[in-house]
Image: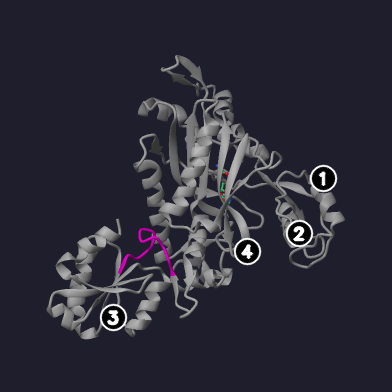
Amino acid sequence: MIKVTMTDIVNLAKNRWVVYAGSEIYGWLANAWDYGPYGSLLKENIKNLWIKEFVQKREDMMLLDAAILMNPKVWVASWHVWGFSDPLMDCKICNKRLRADKLIEEDYAKKDIDQVADGMTKEEMEIYIKENNVTCFECWNSDFTEIKDFNLMFKTYQWVTEDSSSMVYLRPETAQGIFVNFANVARTSRRKIPFGVAQVWKSFRNEITPWNFIFRTREFEQMEIEYFCKPGTEKEIHNKWNKDCENFLVKTLWMDIRNIRFRAHSPEELSHYSNWTYDIEFKYPFGWGELRGIASRTDFDLKAHMKDSKQDMSYFDSVNNKKYIPYVVEPAVWLTRLILASLVDAYTIDEETGRTYLKFEPRVAPIKVWVLPIVKKIWNIAKEIYVKLTDDFICEYDEVWSVGKRYARFDEIGTPFCVTIDTDNYKVGKVTVRHRDSMKQELVEISKLNEYLRKRLK
Ligand code: GAP
């Protein structure tokens, strides 16, 4: 099997309208990425499949869309104001700002130690860096300032004055929007526990060292679920979510199971709110890395908001005649990171022919059908077929270049079907449908074309 590199992925994304460097004409804003015509569709398709799988098909799930700007007291209660920080230090030689834990993990990787540095204290990190002579990424010296906590929340101001009374944060996770609405959702939906609330949209983190294209960015889209359950049932529910999350990747998105693995967090690595957490890791070209987390969040957040807001966040269980604060299981995934994993997973190079194509599940593919006349002079017939197909699918029409070159272009962005129109077949009411993966070609009646494709794209 030919191994895909990060350069392959970045080049494909940039050249095929998937992802552009943000504000490129002004020399880029570091780590800002714009999703191009195909990237936006790809994102939308994955998001819609996630909503279909986890909201539409489930009686126990609902969708929410909370505001990005929240009362700053939310972030005090949730501990983000005190605890949401990364260990930061500067290289005294080249002044590069660095994350101590990432530098240590780089060192682990060089020594083939499969470990993360999350549980280490600042002192332990300083000792490790000194004893192991860990060097700066930039200048390869080992002379650093002491490690300081750097809060990752972006701040901005409401109203006209820029002082602490008008300061607000851009949310670093969508989860808190769900927690502060728990009582609203429980009351208005009249759902019985267990139930879950899903949310998709932007979050922001002022990452010190954003990294590897769209893997770690400062602005990203999260797809989070907070699943509320009776205390004591969270382990069983967590296990079910592990399976559901794996199924979404493997069965819905067609990811290769060999590219994913589960990893349990060690006690030192667990977030302050969690009693256990599993990550699903993905095999990126740069090695195994986190793709999504499934955390058991206990009643930490609801209790914290109940204490600070003085509002009742408990739930009355009418079946058992008991009042309690629910426990929460949180399957969270970052849509933008999932886009990277999907591109890597789908990237296929045929060993014999060298043909490159993205093997997306058809519903994931940005363009579903590409319509092309064999020769330009029948463009009006081809356009008519194209217009009819756009009633059902996102399609593209193309009449430039040779057919072979056009096929290569559609393959590169993973278009599952091409419809080719030629005069002879058109005369008998037929067109040719070409399948991306097998390159098989079939004659299909024009009157049944939409239906034929609908069956294969549902
Ligand atoms: N509400 C839970 C939460 O925010 P987290 O562990 O901070 O948990 C969850 O993040 C997932 O988000 C991680 O599994 C990781 O894949 C992804 N993630 C975290 N920071 C990211 C960033 N800066 N850019 C892209 N993805 C990120």
**Residue type at the position of mark 3:** Glu
Distance between the Cα atoms at labels 1 and 2? 17 Å
Which label number is shown at residue 399?
A: 3
- Which comes sooner in the sequence, label 1 or label 2? 2
Query: Label 4: which residue?
Result: 286
The answer to the question of whether label 3 and label 2 lie on touching residues, with beta carbons closer than 8 A, is no
- Which comes sooner in the sequence, label 3 or label 1? 1
Q: Horizontal placement of 363 versus 248: left or right?
A: left
**Residue type at the position of mark 2:** Asp
* Residue stretch rendered in magenta on the structure: 358-369
**Residue type at the position of mark 4:** Phe
Query: Label 2: which residue?
Result: 107
Dot 1, crowdedness within 10 Å: few (<14), some or many (≥20)?
few
Please state the horizontal and vertical placement of residue 137, each as a whole percent of the image: 74, 64
Distance between the Cα atoms at labels 2 and 4? 14 Å
- Which comes sooner in the sequence, label 4 or label 3? 4
- Which comes sooner in the sequence, label 2 or label 4? 2
- Which comes sooner in the sequence, label 3 or label 2? 2
Residue 66 is drawn in which quadrant? top left
Label 1 sits on a secondary structure element that is helix
Label 3 sits on a secondary structure element that is loop
Dot 2, crowdedness within 10 Å: few (<14), some or many (≥20)?
some
- Which comes sooner in the sequence, label 1 or label 4? 1
Query: Label 1: which residue?
Result: 123
Please state the horizontal and vertical placement of residue 5, each as a whole percent of the image: 58, 70
Asked whether the viewer can see residue 362, the reply is yes
Q: Is residue 10 depicted above or below 172 in this figure? A: below
